[in-house]
Image (cartoon, rainbow, N blue to C red):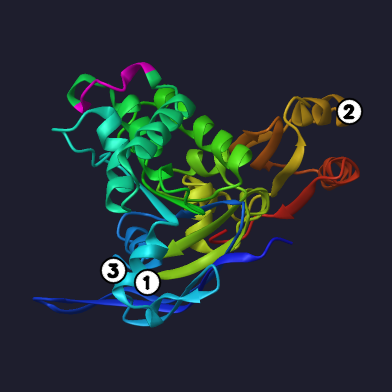
Amino acid sequence: MARPIIELKNLSKIFATSEGELAALNGVDAQIYSGEIFGIIGMSGAGKSTLVRCINFLEKPTGGTVIFDGQDLSKLSQKELGRVRQSMGMIFQQFNLLMQRSVLSNVCFPLEIANVPKKDAVKRAYELLEIVGLADKAKAYPSQLSGGQKQRVAIARALATNPKVLLCDEATSALDPSTTASILSLLKEINKKFGITIVVITHEMSVIEEICNRVAIIDEGLIAEIGDVEEIFAKPKSKAAKKLVFPESKYIEQFVGEKCCRIIFDGRSSFEPVIANMILECKEAVNIMFADTKDIDGKAFGQIVIQLPDDERAAAKIMNYLTSKGLTVEEVLQND
């Protein structure tokens, strides 16, 4: 297993407000491994943006420890912290480009701060614009670019100092679905080509399923659940994870007391018609009460809740068939 490049230990952040103290983070523990694409997802106000700003010490944590590449950030001087931040590129939702600077000049900006000679900075900037597909826009200004192009410039700028980690704070939230897909594809390509660890902060489960290897669910300042994306999509354990993975699952509760079962899809082919084959094989009709499945790399993840026949033998036949096909089948309980 790869080594942790970021370790968060009992991390807390308390803000003073007019109404008293507000705990944005309350004992966060997590490890992010070198070379992975790690997602942090939560509802609005869950603490995810505060968390990413604590990772690079733009916000100083109230308590706990952030270890980056073996260094405890709380023990570094401002000068040392500045050098460490050069290893952590940041990509924002609203791009944060300098409007009075050209595209080339925007990408050069962090290199200027790092005192890189101008000739070298310009060469590096052109290389990065080539990588993000904007070499022909070097002399353009942000106002002349689309949202997707602006985010590509922001990605090039974040890569300028050869960071070990890219922190993406809602980097696709301001983009349309097609542009979002192209940006996520670019980030995956960068991760694969350069081995850069990418941390994706988002409230969109579709972003997590598209790009991430592992994910942490944050809820009310705590990590509710953490693990492989496939595992959490298949079997979310916490209420926060279930709400994000199956946002309509509350509707299942009205079927408690009926003969219902949940079929959990955890990676079988998404092209296999399981329910249709079951009906043909068992010669019994069922009602689909709820369904939420997602296609991740050609595999099905999610759940379907079906209402079984009243006849005990017919119900048992269906359950046995589903089990024989290697599916996880379980009774639907209150508040599942």
Q: Position of residue 173 (x, y in %)?
A: 34, 38
Q: Position of residue 94 (x, y in %)?
A: 25, 40
Label 1: few (<14), some (14–19) or many (≥20) C-alpha neighbours in 10 Å: few
- Identity of the amino acid at label 2? Glu
Given this view, does label 3 or label 1 mark the residue nearer the observer?
A: 1
Identify the residue position indicated by label 1 in the image.
80
Q: Quadrant of residue 135?
A: top left
**Quarter of the N terminus within the rendering:** bottom right
Q: Is residue 172 visible?
A: no
Residue that extends furthest to the top in the rendered view of this protein: 136
Chain part drawn in magenta: 136-142
Task: For marks 1 and 2, give the CA distance.
Answer: 67 Å
Whichever of callouts 3 and 2 sits on the residue coming sooner in the sequence is: 3
Position of 111 relative to 66 (above/below) = above
In the image, which is nearer the foreground, mark 3 or mark 2?
3
> Per the image, is 137 magenta?
yes
Q: Which mark is residue 244?
A: none
Residue 313 counted in the magenta span: no
Q: Nearer the viewer, residue 324 or 207?
A: 207
Task: Residue at 35%, 26% (x, y): give it.
Answer: 148
Quadrant including the C terminus: bottom right
Does residue 211 sit above or below 53 in this rendering? above
The answer to whether residue 122 is visible is yes
User: Does dot 3 land on a helix, a strand or a loop?
Assistant: loop
Q: Name the residue located 53 percent from the left edge and 55 percent from the top edge.
A: 242
Q: Amino acid at mark 1?
A: Glu
Mark identifier at residue 281: 2
Task: Tell me: residue 85, above or below residue 195.
Answer: below
List the residue tagged with mark 3.
59
